[in-house]
Image: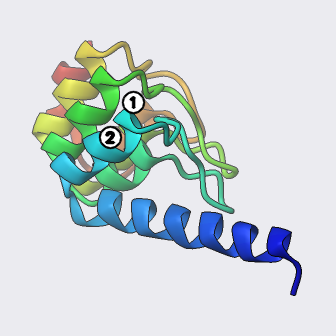
Amino acid sequence: MSPDDSDADKVIELAGKVFDLARHGDADALAGYVDAGVPADLTNDHGDTLVMLAAYHGHRDAVAVLLVRGADPNRANDKGQTPLAGAVFKGEDEIVRLLVAAGADPDAGTPSAREAATMFGKTDLLDALN
């Protein structure tokens, strides 16, 4: 194993740790890593950003610290899904409002957040998307 392989393994390990922080909602640790240089729009092998993972798993504070640090609320994953549509699907009202306030487009993605609200019976969230 060359030194470059060891460095690559360390980067992959660090990225995995940061994605886990987003999934588990550790807002303070995420903020620290992003402040130290981890990209706020870091994506995994499916194109999911840290915001997508935090939003989908219902972690409002983690979403907030990422947005404040420049994460794109409209960045879609490889399937065309956006963090806003994921939050709508999961019924995360507070996160929906937070993402919309940060500029998330309710018509972006496939399905869009509006389409997801209708498709999955989350029509109570349609008002929050306006």
Q: Is residue 7 above or below residue 88?
A: below
Residue 129 found in image quarter: top left
Q: Is residue 52 above or below residue 19?
A: above
- The answer to whether residue 56 of the structure is visible from this angle is yes
Q: Which quadrant does the C terminus fall into?
A: top left
Which residue position is annotated with label 1? 114
Residue at the extreme bottom of the image, as rendered: 1
Q: Which mark is residue 123?
A: none
Residue at the extreme right of the image, as rendered: 2
Amino acid type, residue under disc 1 in the picture: Arg
Task: Name which residue lies at 35% across and 24% down.
Answer: 69
- In the rendering, at what x and y percent does residue 36 appear? 40, 38
Which residue position is annotated with label 2? 117
- In the rendering, at what x and y percent does residue 27 appear? 19, 48
Asked if the residue at tag 2 contacts the one at tag 1, i.e. Cβ–Cβ closer than 8 Å, the answer is: yes
Q: Nearer the viewer, residue 78 or 68?
A: 68
- In the rendering, at what x and y percent does residue 22 appear? 33, 57
Label 2: state its secondary structure.
Answer: helix
Task: Name which residue lies at 30% across and 48% down.
Answer: 30
Task: Name which residue lies at 87% across and 87% down.
Answer: 1
- In the rendering, at what x and y percent does residue 61 appear? 14, 42
Other-residue count near label 2 (Cα within 10 Å), few / some / many at <14 / 14–19 / ≥20: many
Q: CA distance from mark 1 to mark 2?
A: 5 Å
